[in-house]
Amino acid sequence: MSGLDEILNLIDAQQKQTEDSLIKAAVSKANAIKAEGDKKAQKAYEDFMNRSTAQAEKDFENSCNSADAAMKRRILACKVELIDQAVEKTVSKLRSLSDKEYFELMTKLAERHIRADKGVISFGGKDLSRLPADYESKLNELAKKKGGEITVSKEAADIEDGFIHTYGPISENFSFCSIIESEKEAVRDTAARVLFG
């Protein structure tokens, strides 16, 4: 083998060694890049899954809260409706009392609000037409005990039931609707205790 062949073989061997070294370095670099990419992809996947899981849990909790609130609103609306129906039935029963029972109730209601002064009680047209003959005298007996006096107005008040009690410039409406309206919360609380207590 001549010196030229040896030189060529040496150049070939060095070139082969350089190629192997470059290929090895490129493969190593590619593996490092791939590993780094896999690591970043895994981290991005885990972050995404954590955010998605947290969002899904939050959405589920919000949905449950919303459904719970909607159910409570429906239950409350149903209770209010039942209470209002109970109040309406009560008013209807009061309106359908016999004359005797009705005016006994009116007497008890008036007695609670009689003052030591001159007062006027006004009934609606329907009640005025069925007023017991001695009703004014019965009210006056009660009024005298408190140092007052009551007159039953001959003019019909613009109410369906109950009465309007007037002392001087101050009038109080004791119609069933007015009583219920002014005592709405207390009436509803009482009805709720009876119906749902």
Image: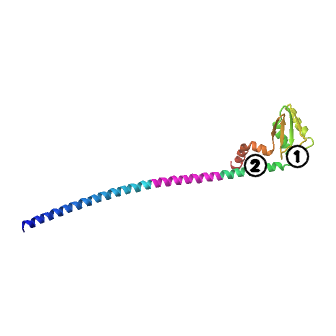
Q: Quadrant of the N terminus?
A: bottom left
Q: For the residue carrying disc 2, how many other residues have a C-alpha within 10 Å: few (<14), some (14-19), or many (20+)?
A: some
Name which residue type carries label 2: Val
Magenta stretch containing residue 65, yes or no?
Answer: yes
The residue under the point 90% across, 46% down is 129
Instruction: Name the residue furthest bottom.
Output: 1
Which dot marks residue 74?
none
Q: What secondary structure prevails in the magenta region?
A: helix
Looking at the image, which residue is at 71% across and 52% down?
A: 81
Rendering coords of residue 47 (x, y %):
42, 53
**Is 193 part of what is drawn in magenta?**
no
Stretch of the chain drawn in magenta: 51-74
Q: Report whether 164 appears left or right of 65.
A: right
Observer-nearest of 66 and 17: 17
Question: Which residue sits at x=77%, y=50%?
Answer: 88
Q: Find the distance from the CA under tag 1 to the CA under tag 2.
A: 23 Å
The residue beneath circle 1 is 125
Mark 2 element type? helix
The picture places residue 73, in percent across and down from the top left corner, at 64, 51
- Residue 127 x %, y %: 87, 46
**Picture quarter containing residue 44?**
bottom left
Pointer 2 residue: 87
* Image quadrant in which you'd find residue 106: top right
Q: Nearer the viewer, residue 105 or 28?
A: 28
Visible residue check, residue 130: no
Amino acid type, mark 1: Gly
